[in-house]
Amino acid sequence: MRIDIGLTHALLFWGTVPVLWGCVLYRDARCFFVAGVFSFLAVMHASLGGGGAVDLAIHLAAYGAGVLVPLFFRRAQTQIEREFSRRRTALLDQRAKAAQRHEAVLKEKNALQDDLERLQNRFALVQVMATKLEAGEILQTLGHMWKKRTGVKGCLILRKQLNGNWSTAFTDGHFNAQDWVRVLASYPSIARSRNIRRYTGSSRQLVLPGQPFGSTCLLVPFNWDKDILAMGIVEVEPQRLQDSTEGFNIERKLVSIGLRRADLYDLMTERSRFDALTGAFLRRSLTERLEDALRKSHRYNTPMFFALMDIDHFKTLNDRWGHLVGDKVLIHLAHVIRRLAHPGITLGRFGGDEFALILEMETVTEVFTWFERLRQAVAESPLRDREAMIRYTLSAGVSAYMPDRPPLSELMAQADHALYQAKKMGRDRVVLWKAPGSPSSSRKTVSV
């Protein structure tokens, strides 16, 4: 077998080397395959022998393959890389858009959850307002709702009393209530505000008590017409300020309605319990308190007394001075009784000039001593109306209750009978009801 060493070298050089160079230059694995093919041809040619046109054809094929094949593969690779880059860019854009949509959906979801939570809280607040008539319960519910709100660091709610003073309706301990009471007293314009106001710890207009420099507080007034009903103080995070203000504004309007409703209920309750002229308990309310006093007396085995009292010749006084002066006399008498009364004495008005007294005292002597002080006070401090001095006297009937004595209805009947006897015996006296045949006690204080 003849081996043509020159041709073999040519195959190896012109075929394998350029292809391997293409492998190094273009880093394409397909070039390695071509190099392997021409290496195989070189070996086969060397084994079988050859020459002439075959050798030339193999030389040309080896040369062409060594130069052109890498260029072909490179062009194909470039096209593939461009297509890959285009598709990769498109996929990255789609991924970015999907991430943006996902983020937007999450934000919308969180916003909807916040809206749902606010609506649920407001629904619960409206339920409390619809079922409760106590202003304290309404403000407590509102305070707990604010405390749980995102962005709220602390809250305090102060209630305006009828006498103008402020009391704490809700606090989470973040604020000092007394400090804020002093702030509202020092800045009347704040207490009269009709809109939510914002203050910071660095404000020159208002130094927030106990708040760090730069902290932000919202002052939320609850008002009805020109009346201030309550004041909310809330510290919020600055980035949540706008959203918080809108929510607080809705809730303060709702709660203002509830507070006004509670105030009207309290007013109606007070008018149903107390006499508008004298401030004394009305008959129904006094009867309830008398029943409580009877139960207490029975439980602790202690005595108590019930008295009916009226003004002597009150009709004549009205005819002479007029009903307006008559009303002033009733007010004057109620004022004198309150001045002399202690926690064991309860005053009620049964109608007209007739008053009732519950006296939780130990002995008859104590009762008579108190009534004597009342008679003297009325005599020594007559009603002054313009230039006139209006003098009047009192008559009273007293009945005593002991745990083994008759019930409420008989107790009131006995007091009424004793009052009738006081009138019959000349007025300006106090009579203690006793069983028939009992001896009298004194000129101005007679027992029947």
Image: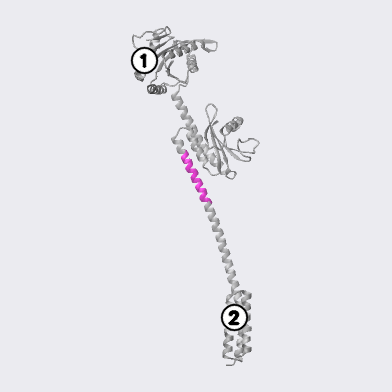
Please, what is the three-letter code of the amino acid marked with disc 1? Gln
* Helix, strand or loop at mark 2: helix
- In the rendered image, residue 360, in percent from the top left (x then y), is placed at 42, 19
Residue lying at the far front in this picture: please name it: 301
Q: Residue at x 50, y 46 (%)?
A: 115
Name the residue beneath numbered marker 1: 414
| Stretch in magenta | 107-125
Mark 2 or mark 1: which comes first in sequence? 2
How many neighbours does mark 2 have within 10 angstroms: few (below 14), some (14-19), or many (20 or more)? Answer: many
Image quadrant in which you'd find residue 401: top left
Query: Horizontally, is 187 left or right of 275 in the view?
Result: right
Please, what is the three-letter code of the amino acid marked with disc 2? Ala
- In the rendered image, residue 167, in percent from the top left (x then y), is placed at 53, 31
Q: Is residue 119 magenta?
A: yes
Q: Is residue 297 magenta?
A: no
Quadrant where the N terminus is found in the figure: bottom right
Residue lying at the far bottom in this picture: please name it: 1
Q: Is residue 223 visible?
A: no
Magenta residues, dominant SS class: helix
The tag on residue 35 is: 2
* Helix, strand or loop at mark 1: helix
Q: Is residue 212 visible?
A: yes
- In the rendered image, residue 236, in percent from the top left (x then y), is placed at 57, 41
Quadrant where the C terminus is found in the figure: top left
Query: Horizontally, is 403 left or right of 93 in the view?
Result: left
Query: Horizontally, is 165 left or right of 418 in the view?
Result: right
- In the rendered image, residue 246, in percent from the top left (x then y), is placed at 55, 42
Residue 238's place in the image compared with 352, above or below, is: below
Foreground pick, 314 / 346: 346
